[in-house]
Image (tube, rainbow, N blue to C red):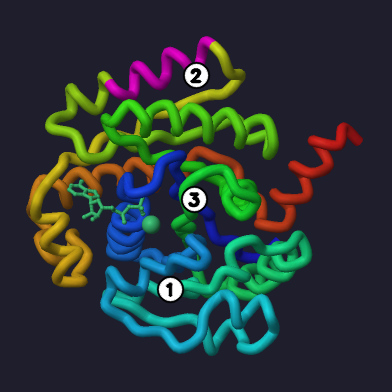
Amino acid sequence: MGHIPKVISITSGKGGVGKTNLSVNIALKIQERGNRVLILDADLGLANVNVLFNITTKKNINDLVSGKASIEEILVEGPGGVHILPASSGIFSSINLSDQDHMRLIGYLESLNDKFDYIIIDTAAGIGGDVLFFNSISHFVTVVVTQEPTSITDAYAVIKVLNKESKIKDFKIIINQVASSTEGKMIYNSLYKVASQFLNVSLEYLGHVVSDKIMTKSVLAQIPVTIYSPQAPVSLCIDSIANRMLDRFNKIPQTGNVQLFWEKMVKDANF
Ligand SMILES: Nc1ncnc2c1ncn2[C@@H]1O[C@H](COP(=O)(O)OP(=O)(O)O)[C@@H](O)[C@H]1O
Ligand SMILES: [Mg+2]
């Protein structure tokens, strides 16, 4: 078997919890450690990744899936050599891809196997078909939660649905926008308690990210916060989460996108 990138998805129940900012900055940190990283903007129809990088894109995943552009025409390079597969913005028809589109996309991603060590997928919020798909091709499903009660109940809901529909059992949790590590741990514990009581899933805490005005400033400046202010507490939190992810990857067995996808389908069908 050839080289296969490790796939990390960043997802959430509720929108606006920090998925895109975390995806972009975690990607930069993983790249900084000598890996080749691709960010896949899977918030189809509401492209955000290129906006955070202040990069305008002519073509996007929509053109790829509809056969109007090749993958090389779509890939763009960002700071530090990180690559981006941009989504479209404001195109309703791209929001729900068909099963055929999903399989085509897997094929395109596989053609990039030799080019990348990590693929970070920034998903849309919620439990739509595309969200299920992108998480089901991930080796490392990461759920972002904030302290808002709706964010916690929505995280529980997304974990429940991903488990029931896509048979995902292992979830990594990031608690974003908290005041301290104690607060992060408290929120994680409350999610862990309900999930382990009512669902057959295993959760692992990746850590907290503090709430920091510098994050908003960096978004306005269109410079990812870990570049804008690398020593700010928020950047240091993201750095340790990226480290923890890399550390975990040394411990899990690897399979390719398609293999992973099909293995799960076969398992689900009880062949
Ligand atoms: N740790 C944080 N501290 C302060 N603001 C944050 C933090 N994380 C995210 N935000 C703010 O929350 C907003 C939504 O973030 P975004 O990454 O776009 O969320 P999502 O992709 O989940 O919709 C942004 O305006 C961002 O500045
Ligand atoms: Mg987003």
Q: CA distance from mark 1 to mark 3?
A: 14 Å
Q: Residue 5, how many percent across, how many down?
A: 55, 61
Instruction: Say which label, 2 or 1, has the lower sequence index.
Output: 1
Instruction: Say which label, 2 or 3, has the lower sequence index.
Output: 3
What residue do we see at 44% from left, 57% from top? 122
Q: CA distance from mark 2 to mark 1?
A: 33 Å
Q: Residues within 10 Å of mark 2 (few under 14, many from 20)?
A: some
Q: Residue 41, how many percent across, how many down?
A: 46, 65
Helix, strand or loop at disc 2? Answer: helix
Q: Is residue 167 above or below residue 127?
A: above
What residue do we see at 27% from left, 78% from top? 54
Instruction: State the residue in front, 111 or 220.
Output: 220
Q: Residues within 10 Å of mark 1 (few under 14, many from 20)?
A: many
Residue located beneath label 1 in the image:
84
The amino acid type of the residue labelled 1 equals Ile
The amino acid type of the residue labelled 2 equals Ala
